[in-house]
Amino acid sequence: MENELNKILHGPKKNVDAELLLKYLNDELSNAEKHELEMHLLDEDFDNEALEGLQQVANKERIRLIVDGLNRDLKNRTSRRKRRREQLSLKPLWWLYFSILILLIIIVMIYLYLHTKF
């Protein structure tokens, strides 16, 4: 229980970005950076599984192309959803508001005319 409380109090740990994982796979990190990343991967299952998935790709040069393609697809999907949400949202219909206001003014004027004449 206390261990879970400490996790909450310390906040979420920062995930490793894709560039760092790619540099690790291409052996472009210094020994200190490798050690720090490996220590982080011991604690973070999600990041560890991401690295294992990247290690399973046979052609390491294609990893960057795959990541770029996935990011591009994700951006396209989210932008389509955003456009669709904007299309479905109600935009202010000023002409309708103005027409209702004019109609209310006319009704009030007719009411006043009928009640003041008699």
Image: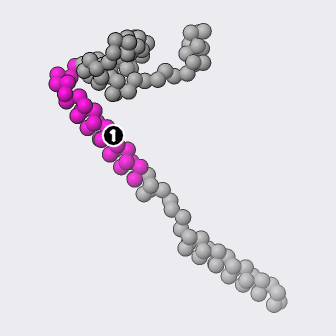
Which corner quadrant of the image does residue 17 belong to? Answer: top left
Q: Which residues are magenta?
A: 56-84
Residue 92 in view of the camera: yes
- Residue 43: x and y in percent read 43, 12
Mark 1, Cα crowd under 10 Å, few <14 / some 14-19 / many 20+, is few
Residue in the image at 43% along x and 52% along y: 85
Q: Residue furthest top?
A: 2
Q: Is residue 85 above or below residue 18?
A: below
**The image quarter in which residue 9 lies:** top right
Q: What amino acid does circle 1 point to? A: Leu
Relative vertical location of residue 90 with respect to residue 25 in this rendering, above or below = below
Task: Locate residue 86, reporting x and y percent.
Answer: 44, 55
User: Would you name the residue on which mark 1 appears?
Assistant: 74
Indicate the quadrant containing the N terminus: top left, top right, bottom left or bottom right.
top right
Q: Does the magenta segment cover residue 55?
A: no
**Residue 71 image offset from top left, x and y in percent:** 31, 37
| Residue lying furthest front | 30
The count of marks equals: 1
At 19% from the left and 27% from the top, the residue drawn is 61
Front residue (pair 27, 93)? 27
Residue at image position (34%, 24%) is 20
* Lateral position of residue 63 relative to residue 83, left or right: left
Q: Residue furthest left?
A: 59
Q: Main secondary structure of the magenta part?
A: helix
Q: Position of residue 26 (x, y in %)?
A: 25, 21
Locate the C terminus and report the quarter of the image it occupies.
bottom right
Query: Is residue 39 left or right of 108 when viewed as pictured?
Result: left
Residue 59 falls inside the magenta stretch: yes
Asked if residue 57 is positioned above or below residue 3 in the image, the reply reads below
